[in-house]
């Protein structure tokens, strides 16, 4: 969606000038660059692309088409979204930017708060729901095509670990620039240094590897999604230094060691998905491509979840068990964490 209000915050990525609507997109009255909006989002990528690029631009990462539709938040997604809501307290009047929005599903899940949302990602794999109802920008987080102090709140989920130290600094500095003074940003990511409880997650992952070797799991897509993790933050002291360099204070943090969650999501959920994919593949035409089975399985699962029937409530019960990871281990220092960063006004830096 490209709403009229988007033009109050969108800026030319080259000369930072406010844009003029030029259906189906926009134009810069200063440098005269024209920006395409024919696909339901505004393409505001800079002319000169950064050398460092994410693998999320690769079509292979999206062969399962998980981005196309939005199911209710469940399992780890619900835990992250519930922490987001607790840390940010979204309310009517908030202007929120989703930095690295992916499909746009987190904005969809939070529409009931009354806040207004703008999502930006370098990869245009947006869901139909987001394209129909959210302002979406294709752009680089290191050069946000957005006005100074345009937003009161922001979030970035599963993004920071994909950045180099320089890219992380640039991204957080840009986030600080587009946030109003005392604005807050919620992040979910991890540092390189893990706590002692991480041994539980490693054991679950070893079990998953063993199950994959005997054909009960297929983790190739998950490995590809994590293959460009650069993990730029060494530890939580480094996090505070990196945040401070960009003008943020780390105001609140909850650690997250997903031992139960790793078993439920990386093993049980993947085993169910594998079984459904094989069933869908067996019934697919011989000419179907290699990803047809997993796409059909995911589409069918999302349809059943949206109906809020037995499958939905069973998955909600599993999600409830996964909350034990937050309740039991949330005070113990670990690699993964949820944090709220608050922007300091420039005079306080």
Image (cartoon, rainbow, N blue to C red):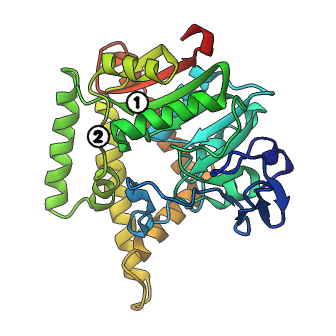
Residue 280, quarter of picture: bottom left
Q: Are marks 1 and 2 in contact (CB under 8 Å)?
A: no
> Please, which residue is most extreme toward the front here?
31
Number of labels in the image equals 2
* Left or right of 52 in this view: 91: right
Q: Residue at x 28, y 22 (%)?
A: 235
Q: Residue at x 60, y 42 (%)?
A: 106
Q: Which residue is mark 1?
A: 321
Give the camera-side residue of 125 and 147: 147
Q: Secondary structure at mark 1?
A: helix
> Please, which residue is most extreme toward the bottom here?
287
Decide: is 88 above or below 81: above
Q: Which residue is mark 2?
A: 263
**Mark 1–mark 2 distance (CA, rounded to whole Å):** 11 Å
Q: Residues within 10 Å of mark 1 (few under 14, many from 20)?
A: some
* Residue 39, image x, y percentages: 69, 68
Specify the label residue 20 is tagged with.
Answer: none
């Amino acid at each position: 969606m490209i709403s009229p209000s988007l033009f109050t915050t969108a800026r030319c990525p080259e000369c930072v000038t406010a844009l003029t609507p030029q259906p189906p997109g926009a134009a810069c009255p200063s440098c005269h660059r024209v920006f395409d909006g024919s696909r339901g989002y505004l393409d505001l990528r800079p002319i000169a692309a950064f050398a460092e690029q994410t693998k999320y631009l690769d079509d292979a990462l999206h062969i399962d088409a998980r981005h196309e539709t939005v199911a209710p938040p469940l399992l780890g997604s619900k835990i992250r979204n519930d922490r987001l809501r607790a840390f940010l307290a979204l309310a009517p009047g908030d202007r929120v930017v989703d930095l690295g929005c992916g499909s746009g599903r987190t904005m969809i899940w939070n529409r009931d708060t009354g806040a207004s949302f703008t999502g930006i990602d370098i990869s245009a794999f947006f869901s139909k729901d987001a394209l129909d109802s959210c302002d979406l920008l294709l752009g680089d987080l290191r050069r946000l095509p957005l006005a100074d102090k345009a937003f009161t709140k922001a979030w970035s989920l599963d993004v920071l670990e994909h950045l180099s130290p320089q890219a992380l600094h640039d991204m957080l500095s840009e986030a600080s620039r587009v946030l109003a003074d005392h604005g807050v940003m919620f992040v979910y990511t991890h540092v390189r240094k893990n706590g002692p409880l991480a041994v539980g997650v490693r054991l679950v992952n070893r079990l998953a590897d063993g199950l994959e070797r005997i054909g009960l799991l297929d983790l190739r897509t998950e490995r590809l999604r994590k293959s460009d993790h650069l993990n730029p933050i060494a530890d939580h002291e480094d996090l505070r230094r990196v945040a401070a360099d960009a003008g943020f204070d780390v105001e609140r943090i909850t650690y997250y060691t997903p031992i139960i969650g790793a078993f439920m999501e990386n093993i049980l959920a993947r085993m169910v998905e594998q079984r459904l994919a094989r069933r869908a593949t067996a019934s697919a035409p011989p000419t179907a491509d290699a990803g047809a089975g997993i796409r059909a399985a995911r589409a069918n699962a999302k349809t059943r979840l949206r109906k809020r029937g037995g499958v939905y409530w069973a998955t909600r019960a599993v999600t409830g068990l996964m909350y034990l990871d937050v309740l039991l281990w949330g005070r113990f220092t670990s690699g993964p964490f949820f944090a709220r960063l608050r922007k300091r006004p420039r005079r306080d830096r």
